[in-house]
Image (cartoon, helix red, strand yellow):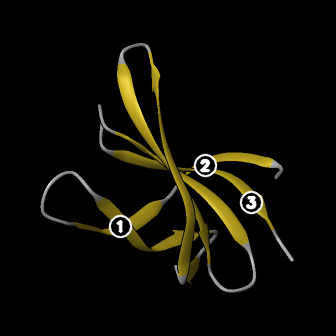
Amino acid sequence: MPPVAENVRVAAIFTPGTQIKPVWFEWRCRKHAIIATSYFWKDSFGGVTRLHFAVSDGSNLFELMFDTYDQSWILMAVEEQ
């Protein structure tokens, strides 16, 4: 997937416990409804935990990253069909 690394606005559901489920995000003035999450993983950068989500809007694949330190979302990569 080609890298993007752009801040995006994300609507997410914080379920009981520690799970986060992104529902939709806005990128380049377009709202993308998340239909499926195909993969989830964690990493750390400078002691900060980052949560990564491989998601699809039904036609494209995206990697979203949630930074737990500043609670920001970044669109890391896009695979457009």
Amino acid tagged 1: Lys
Q: Indicate whether 70 appears above or below 34.
A: above
Earlier along the polypeptide chain: callout 2 or callout 1? 2
**Residue at (54% x, 84% y) in the render:** 35
Pointer 3 local density, CA inside 10 Å: few below 14, some 14–19, many at least 20:
some
Query: Residue 76 versus residue 51: which sits nearer the camera?
Result: 51
Where is residue 48? Give x, y as percent.
36, 23
Pointer 2 local density, CA inside 10 Å: few below 14, some 14–19, many at least 20:
few
Tag shown at residue 21: 1
**Which residue was labeled with disc 3?**
78
How much space separates mark 2 and mark 1, taking CA atoms? 19 Å
Label 1, secondary structure: give it: strand
Query: Residue 77 versus residue 39: which sits nearer the camera?
Result: 39
Earlier along the polypeptide chain: callout 3 or callout 2? 2
How much space separates mark 3 and mark 2, taking CA atoms? 11 Å
Q: Foreground mark, 2 or 1?
A: 1
Where is residue 7? Give x, y as percent.
52, 50
Q: Is residue 79 left or right of residue 39?
A: right
Query: Residue 31 versus residue 67: which sits nearer the camera?
Result: 67
**Residue at (42% x, 36% y) in the render:** 50
Amino acid tagged 2: Glu
Residue 64: quadrant of the picture? bottom right
**Residue at (41% x, 65% y) in the render:** 10
Amino acid tagged 3: Val
Pointer 1 local density, CA inside 10 Å: few below 14, some 14–19, many at least 20:
few
**Which residue was labeled with disc 2?**
6
Q: Indicate whether 69 appears above or below 2.
A: above
**Residue at (52% x, 71% y) in the render:** 26
Q: Is residue 42 left or right of residue 60?
A: left
Q: Foreground mark, 3 or 1?
A: 1
